[in-house]
Image (cartoon, grey):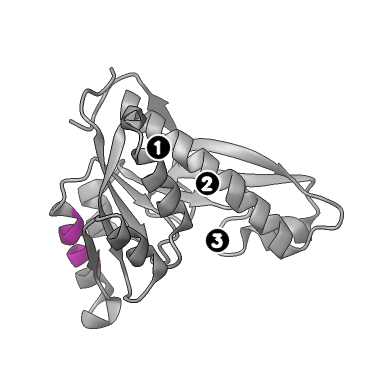
Amino acid sequence: MSRTEPAALVVLVSGSGTNLQALLDACADPAYGARVVAVGADRDGIEGLARAERAGIPTFVVRLKEFETREEWDAALAGACAAYDPDIIVSAGFMKLLGSTFLARYGGKVLNTHPALSPSFPGMHGPADALAYGVKVTGATLFVVDPGVDTGPIVAQTAVAVAEDDTVETLHERIKVAERAMLVDSVGRLAREGFVVEGRRVRIGRLDPLK
């Protein structure tokens, strides 16, 4: 079932916001099927927030250090997102793990990317681990966030060949380019066609649980 109204996206960032910018650019086309309604962050003074402000998008910041516990921060972040009634939440370079309260509220609606072909090389050093292992092909994965680390149901994957002279930096840069294209393409499709998570499978277009 396709959607008639653009899906509302809340994008979470912690840094420069290049993936956010790609989504903002895509959303400028009415045919894309989504619009960024807010950008949230865990710290001030980052380029990701500045990109949002230049685009006239509302922003919010929920700082971990202002809360007694991680659980209180997690609940506050969920509440900040709720103010914008998101259909999909995109973690775009957001460097904090989302906790049980957040996922209880938004489970099945939160997307994240990982710079490796899951389930291989989870964690913070996917490109370095792939290079060290000697694989000939790595890539990026878009997944629905669950309580694990890069373990959620897979939405899409894109492959990137490893060159003989690659360094971690050169490989990671090529992965980022492929990851950004995959993210924009997939979020648009999810927004337009709807999706549902059934166990380990993300089924697109079967029905629309967003509305």
State the SS at label 2.
helix
Q: Is residue 9 magenta?
A: no
Residue at the image point whose x is 35% and y is 21% from the top:
205
Q: Position of residue 40 (x, y in %)?
A: 28, 61
- Say which quarter of the image contains residue 134: bottom right
Relative to 177, is 15 on the left or the right?
A: left
Q: Position of residue 119 (x, y in %)?
A: 58, 46
Quadrant position of the C terminus in the picture: top left
Comes first in the chain, label 3 or label 1? 3
State the SS at label 1.
helix
Start-end of magenta stretch: 74-81
Determine the main secondary structure of the stretch shown in magenta: helix
| Residue 189 visible here | yes
Question: What amino acid is labelled 1 in the image?
Answer: Val
Comes first in the chain, label 1 or label 2? 2
Look at discs 3 and 2 and give the one toward the viewer.
Answer: 2
Relative to 173, is 134 on the left or the right?
A: right
Q: For the residue carrying disc 1, how many other residues have a C-alpha within 10 Å: few (<14), some (14-19), or many (20+)?
A: many
Quadrant position of the N terminus in the picture: top left
Give the residue pinned by disc 3.
Answer: 123
Q: CA distance from mark 3 to mark 1?
A: 23 Å
Q: CA distance from mark 1 to mark 2?
A: 11 Å
